[in-house]
Image: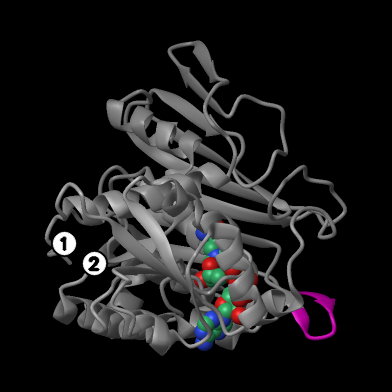
Amino acid sequence: MKARAKAKGATERIRVGFIGCGRIADLQCLGYLEHPRAEIVAVCDLDAARAQRRAEEWGVPKVYTDVEQLLADPDVDAVEILTPHHLHEVHAAAALEAGKHVSLQKPPTRTLEELDRLIGVAERSGRILRVFENFMYYPPHQKAKELVEEGAIGTPISVRVKTALGRLTDGWQIEPETQTWRMDPKRCGGGPATFDHGYHCFHMGRFFIPAEVDRVHAFIHWTRLADNAWIDVPALISWRYAGDPIRYGSWEVVPSFQMRIRTEYYVSDDRLEIHGTRGIIWVNCCTGKLLDEPSLVLYRDGETRAYHDLPTDWAESFRRGGLDFVGALLEGRAPPQGVDEARRTLAFALAAARSAEEGREVALSELLVSAGG
Ligand SMILES: NC(=O)c1ccc[n+]([C@@H]2O[C@H](COP(=O)([O-])OP(=O)(O)OC[C@H]3O[C@@H](n4cnc5c(N)ncnc54)[C@H](O)[C@@H]3O)[C@@H](O)[C@H]2O)c1
């Protein structure tokens, strides 16, 4: 979808409404609070006390508990949607129809059918719909992308992501309801690890390689944590990229539930390796602070270069993502990720789930064709 928003004049501001004021709103607010031409003017949450707390924290004048009321507010230009996944389509479609630009948290929807309906609404509305995936804004990942594009490792031929899950009592406190909807595949759209978190890792699988993923194979085991609480780990997923050269990628999630992971956020960390024809890049951290290694290491021509001074706080990826959305609206440009990108990443995640369920390799075309192209 092309950006069709008109660039705003130099003095105009982007007035943002938050729909959903739960856990991740802590970080999602950062770019909007900082940008000199953005302002959070309204918040909305079913939980009135939570919405009120956010309004006080951020100095926001308007507080709603009904999405329709926020969407009817003419002072809101754009919305940030931070609700559970089963509500994404309906909230984003209503916002677009109300004439608001939309930043929608990953995964955009539970299914391709939901996303395709939403894309139709976005196209008719002429408003911007961006899907927000923060790993692509994480500074070591951005540096890795820059190095790959400069040719620092030759042709990239493999991506490997590894996620460590740690002791669940560490890190952020997570409200029981936040866990409950994530562990309910009907509301989440899949598993909390391989679909909810997985969207980031599948996107990283696509981010560094200039070829589409065409085939996926997955082992995903469901582990019982407590009564009615299941998590889709361990998991090992591999894929092939289309075209020449032949190249593969993989992602593994390891449930090391007795391991302490230093983190200010979720109790997990993600490490990444991009292997090229002439060199290798390692990104050694993301959500947490598992290792005391340089955040990025580049190997090439017998030499190793360590990057020690990239910003590594995971929050930085949210700050940059918020600033980018405001910048895109002010400049009238399409922000990453547009819906076409998001659709490929969602298909990738859904193909992995289908592969594990059916015990076979799945071609992404099976999903994309049945969902209409
Ligand atoms: N980028 C990331 O790394 C990242 C991390 C966490 C969450 N997320 C995404 O952010 C979104 C929210 O996740 P969370 O962890 O903050 O969840 P959460 O459960 O903490 O927050 C969701 C909020 O939505 C509110 N809500 C539910 N129904 C509503 C309705 N009809 N109207 C208004 N408010 C409603 C709830 O009361 C709650 O406060 C999800 O899409 C999730 O995948 C992204």
Give the residue furthest to the right. 258
- For the point 44% across and 57% down, which residue is it? 133
- For the point 37% across and 65% down, which residue is it? 16
Q: Are marks 2 and 1 in contact (CB under 8 Å)?
A: yes
Determine which residue is flagged by label 2: 128
Label 2 sits on a secondary structure element that is loop
- Give yes or no for residue 247 being in the magenta stretch: no
**Against 190, is 61 above or below?**
above
Circle nearer the N terminus (2, 1): 1
Residue range highlighted in magenta = 222-229
Q: Residues within 10 Å of mark 2 (few under 14, many from 20)?
A: many
Is the C terminus in the top left, top right, bottom left or bottom right quadrant?
bottom left
Label 1 sits on a secondary structure element that is loop
- For the point 29% across and 42% down, which residue is it? 245
Q: Toward which corner of the image does residue 230 lie, by quadrant?
A: bottom right
Q: Position of residue 132 (x, y in %)?
A: 41, 60
Q: Residues within 10 Å of mark 1 (few under 14, many from 20)?
A: some
Determine which residue is flagged by label 1: 3
Q: Toward which corner of the image does residue 88 lie, by quadrant?
A: bottom left
The front one of 317 and 308 is 317
The image quadrant where one finds ligand 1 is bottom right
Is the N terminus in the top left, top right, bottom left or bottom right quadrant?
bottom left
**Against 72, is 54 above or below?**
above
**Against 53, is 136 above or below?**
above
